[in-house]
Image (tube, rainbow, N blue to C red):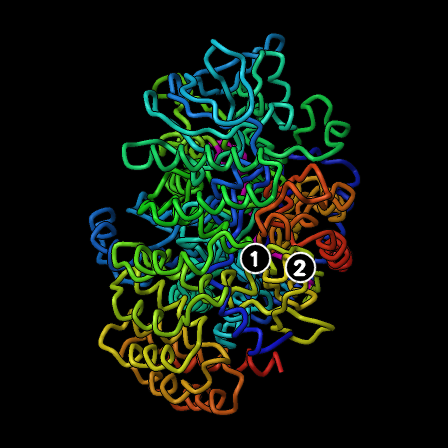
């Protein structure tokens, strides 16, 4: 038996070799025991489920586009999420997927599912977990949303009008059952495997000709106060261009790829708000390219894409025309996705991965977060935001609704529960460390999580992991004007608000409140410390 | 206030309370559409323009970096001041911003470029304006909306400049009524949002009700969502008894709008509405039945528990799942028993699993 450990492309310092020796010894003994007991020390399997929303009105389009029979799983219309409301889907460009990788090593068994949806709330994740068979023996289920902006409304705020939820609960039930079955299938098909990691970045993949594009392959669409002090060279634009990669291959033939998981921090929203075709956006083209070149199943996992990492202000060079691809087109998404895929493929080391994996996980649940956001309270009260979301007061579920604003705003309903409950988690697979955050995380905070992954050579941030609670930004950079002015904005008289100017950028409007970062980071650092 | 009491109160206002997203900066997750009034109040300049170049560019002198801008010809300045003569140029910023086509006429709501932290550097190019209009705040003029839209904006600007409150209210009421009865859904929807957000401010009065019922609430030509929203608001203000109108709305609307009406009606419980929803639950259309089940899934509809329990044996999975979901939201022993029975005895595996999950959720929340 030989143990081969990947240490990526980093220089191999004495420190690293020392760690390798210690880690090797640590792995060796349990690995020997495991082999002697007949249990392989690393196994993996994938599964995929088509979760494309198919309504009666779109069934013919589905069949025409994909050549597959359409099984209706959604009511008409399918409201596309992510931008403004009332954006009904008119057809399809590509399918949406639930893609699951189950890894089983020395220690824990973990299921990582990536959904091509805008976000998936913790209550739905718990429903999935309750539906996973105990026989699958999964220790930690991670359900991630890529946060694409061209799929069904799974949160509720993108319906036909401001007061009508865009959620079809029948569709959520379908997704829940599909994911649970997918996890069960993968857990039942675990096979001996190898795992390796790599880290690269997207620097240079965009042309840098827009004032908001620094050539990093991802742009920062929202500059916070004092960001210019942190990043003076880019006028305060701060991005995380890291591409973290995990590849799992078959044990016997390491060229036979089982799965390639890519972690990248950018909103999949390049088609923009005028598009009405269902698509998973540029990750679709990245996955296709990776699968074509490497085989196996490609899994896209969005990272710390908050505040406000995205592709909308980027230009990319179309190799067919040698000109910038036209923005907001599927060709743009294709070029960008394939560029990212090529960068990923070139970074994966050719050496065989490790046949042994020590997998450890730690979680904190529930993580209470004080709900400050009056807009969220408004839409929870109205049932526009997923009505399965529970709020809590003193740890007890509280579905109360009231009218706490003084006149003349005392007609505005507000959910009264003091806090929402979410969760954080982390896991390690050999030299790689993964933080699972429920938010759209500011990369500035993401860097602090990565720094806490002591000794890890490859760091992953699974954003929108097991929940979607909105943006998480550094507490000192909080601007309360949007929340403070909520009754005035909701009441239609923002000009009367004593707090001026009002910054209701999405990073403040779609934000649980000032308590997010203290709560999430307060839970995350101990979890990471448990593993590092 | 908590529990089912506020749900009834809530039901009275639910479809009528909307956002007036007048905040100057809006981005990709937008709660509702902005109203004309909100956009007008939040803008430094409101202008009727003809688009000349939708994809022009300005270039920063030192870095050579560029930014797409829209170049337009001014047709009418509705608010603010502009330098005369030169074409109007503005950048756009946000997620999913409004995009234009050369030659079309539009109303644009502009802010000074210095209000954008991301784009204020463009001021060195001489660019003065930025639009934060997202795609759902794109107002392109055509023969059907030109006159009422421009008239409404002139009215709002005029009211904004009115110093005397009663005169201001009189002008706003005139615009509100004109928009509500314009027959143009987007404009009427804007007015109903402002109406609901106004609390008790008399943007409409009881004298307006017959016209509003005839032209909107009871008009099959009006969009169902608009009818529902205005009905809710008129009922909340005590101008009408909502129940008979809800029943009429339910009975005279067809799919796909009916699904929306069913959901809205569920927020307005009354014996007559409940009876109608229960009848839909037992109807032939599984999609409508599922929507009715979800609409009945609130504590205010606890009397519907037997009907929901019976729907657990519906041949269509969609209806069964909706009934499970609804029963899970009714915190009564009878609803819980129905779920437990389904979890233990139902012949369909998915139904058993989903019911069991709902039972576990209910037990956890206890």
Residue A199 place in picture, x, y as percent: 60, 38
* In the image, residue A85 above or below residue B333: above
Q: Start and end of the magenta stretch?
A: A340-363
Say which quadrant the N terminus of chain B sits in. bottom right
Left or right of A301 in this view: A317: left
* In the image, residue B327 above or below residue A426: below
Q: Is residue B293 magenta?
A: no
Give the image quarter of residue B261.
bottom left
| Residue at image coords 43%, 91% | B341
Left or right of B336 in this view: B149: left
Q: Which residue is mark 1?
A: B199
| Residue at image coords 58%, 18% | B128
Left or right of A166 in this view: B83: right
Alpha carbon separation for disc pair 2 and 1 = 9 Å
Q: Is residue A360 magenta?
A: yes
In contact (CB < 8 Å): disc 2 and disc 1: yes
Give the image quarter of residue A231.
top right
> Which of the labelled discs sits on residue A457, or is there none?
none
| Residue at image coords 63%, 65% | A403
Chain containing the residue with disc 2: A
Say which quadrant the C terminus of chain B sits in. bottom right
Q: Give SS at disc 2.
A: loop
Chain containing the residue with disc 1: B
> Which of the labelled discs sits on residue A407, or is there none?
2
Q: Give SS at disc 1.
A: loop
* In the image, residue B313 above or below residue A245: below
Q: Residues within 10 Å of mark 1 (few under 14, many from 20)?
A: many
Q: Between residues B126 and A135, which one lies in front from this camera angle?
A: B126
Q: Is residue A459 visible?
A: no
| Residue at image coords 55%, 64% | A40
Do the residues at discs 2 and 1 belong to one chain?
no
Residue B336 place in picture, x, y as percent: 50, 88
């Amino acid at each position: 038996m030989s143990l081969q450990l990947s240490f990526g492309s980093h220089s191999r310092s004495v420190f690293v070799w020392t760690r390798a020796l210690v880690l090797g010894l640590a792995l060796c003994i349990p690995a020997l025991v495991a082999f002697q007991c007949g249990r392989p020390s690393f196994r993996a399997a994938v599964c995929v489920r088509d979760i494309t929303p198919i309504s009666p009105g779109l069934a013919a389009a589905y069949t025409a586009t994909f050549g597959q029979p359409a099984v209706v799983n959604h009511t008409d219309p399918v409201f596309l999420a992510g931008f403004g409301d009332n954006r009904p889907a008119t057809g399809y460009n590509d399918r949406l997927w639930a893609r699951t990788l189950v890894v089983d090593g020395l220690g824990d068994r973990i299921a990582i599912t990536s959904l091509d949806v805008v976000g998936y709330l913790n209550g739905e994740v718990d429903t999935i977990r309750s539906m996973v068979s105990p026989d699958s023996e999964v220790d930690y289920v991670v359900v991630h949303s890529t946060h694409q902006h061209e799929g069904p409304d799974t949160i509720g705020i993108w319906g036909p009008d401001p007061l009508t939820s865009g959620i079809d609960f029948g569709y959520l039930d379908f997704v829940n059952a599909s994911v649970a079955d997918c996890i069960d299938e993968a857990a039942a098909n675990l096979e001996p495997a190898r795992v390796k990691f790599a880290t690269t970045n997207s620097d240079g993949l965009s042309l840098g000709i827009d004032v908001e594009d620094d050539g990093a392959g991802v742009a920062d669409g929202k500059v916070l106060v004092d960001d210019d002090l942190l990043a003076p060279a880019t006028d305060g634009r701060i991005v995380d261009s890291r591409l973290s990669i995990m590849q799992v291959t078959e044990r016997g033939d390491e060229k036979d790829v089982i799965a390639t998981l890519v972690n990248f921090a950018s909103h999949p929203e390049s088609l923009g708000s005028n598009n009405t075709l269902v698509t998973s956006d540029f990750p679709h083209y990245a996955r296709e390219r990776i699968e074509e070149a490497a085989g196996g199943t490609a899994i896209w996992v969005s990272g710390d894409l908050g505040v406000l990492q995205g592709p909308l202000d980027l230009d990319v060079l179309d190799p067919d025309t040698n000109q910038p691809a036209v923005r907001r087109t599927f060709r743009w998404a294709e070029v960008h996705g394939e560029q990212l895929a090529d960068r990923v493929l070139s970074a994966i080391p050719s050496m065989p991965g490790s046949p042994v994996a020590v997998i450890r996980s730690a979680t904190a649940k529930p993580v209470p977060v004080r709900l400050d956001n009056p807009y969220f309270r408004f839409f929870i009260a109205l049932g526009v935001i997923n009505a399965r979301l529970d709020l809590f007061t003193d740890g007890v579920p509280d579905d109360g609704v009231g009218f706490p604003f003084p006149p003349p705003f005392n007609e505005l309903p507000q959910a009264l529960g003091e806090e929402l409950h979410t969760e954080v988690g982390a896991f390690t697979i050999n030299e790689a460390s993964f933080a699972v955050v429920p938010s759209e995380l500011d990369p500035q905070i993401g860097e602090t999580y990565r720094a806490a992954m002591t000794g890890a050579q490859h760091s992953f941030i699974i954003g929108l992991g097991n929940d979607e609670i909105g943006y998480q930004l550094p507490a000192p950079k909080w601007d309360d004007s949007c929340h403070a002015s909520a009754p005035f904005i909701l009441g239609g008289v923002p000009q009367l608000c004593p707090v001026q100017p009002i910054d209701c950028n999405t990073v403040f409007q779609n934000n649980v409140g000032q308590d997010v970062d203290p709560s999430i980071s307060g839970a995350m650092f101990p979890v990471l410390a448990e593993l590092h | 206030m908590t529990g089912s009491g506020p749900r009834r109160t809530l039901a009275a206002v639910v479809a009528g309370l909307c956002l007036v997203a007048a905040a100057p900066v809006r981005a990709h997750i937008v709660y509702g559409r902005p109203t004309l009034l909100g956009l007008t109040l939040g803008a430094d300049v409101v202008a009727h323009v003809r688009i000349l170049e939708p994809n022009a560019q300005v270039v920063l002198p030192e870095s050579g970096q560029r930014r797409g801008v829209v170049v337009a010809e001014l047709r009418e300045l509705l608010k603010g001041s502009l330098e005369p003569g030169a074409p109007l140029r503005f950048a756009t910023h946000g997620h999913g911003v409004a995009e234009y086509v050369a030659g079309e006429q539009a109303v644009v709501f502009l802010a000074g470029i210095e209000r954008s932290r991301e784009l204020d550097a463009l001021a060195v190019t001489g660019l003065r304006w930025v639009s934060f209009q997202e795609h759902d705040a794109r107002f392109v003029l055509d023969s059907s909306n030109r006159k009422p839209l421009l008239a409404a904006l002139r009215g709002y600007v005029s009211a904004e400049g009115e110093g005397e409150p009663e005169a201001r209210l009189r002008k706003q009421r005139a615009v509100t009524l004109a928009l509500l009865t314009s027959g143009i859904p987007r404009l009427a929807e804007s007015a109903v949002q402002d109406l609901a957000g106004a609390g008790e401010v008399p943007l409409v009065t009881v004298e307006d009700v017959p016209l509003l019922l005839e032209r909107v609430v009871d008009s099959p030509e009006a969009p169902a969502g608009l009818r529902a929203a205005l009905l809710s608001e008129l009922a909340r203000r005590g101008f009408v008894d909502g129940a008979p109108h809800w029943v009429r709305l339910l009975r005279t609307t067809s799919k796909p709008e009916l699904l929306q009406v069913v959901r809205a009606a569920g927020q307005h419980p009354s014996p007559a509405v409940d009876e109608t929803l229960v009848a839909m639950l037992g109807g032939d259309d599984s999609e409508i039945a599922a929507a009715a089940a979800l609409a009945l899934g609130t504590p205010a509809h606890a009397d519907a528990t037997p009907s929901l329990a019976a729907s657990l044996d519906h041949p269509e999975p969609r209806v069964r799942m909706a009934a499970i979901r609804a029963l899970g939201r009714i915190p009564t022993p009878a609803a819980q028993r129905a779920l437990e029975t389904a979890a233990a005895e139902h012949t369909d595996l998915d139904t058993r699993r989903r019911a069991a999950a709902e039972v576990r959720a209910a037990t956890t929340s206890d």
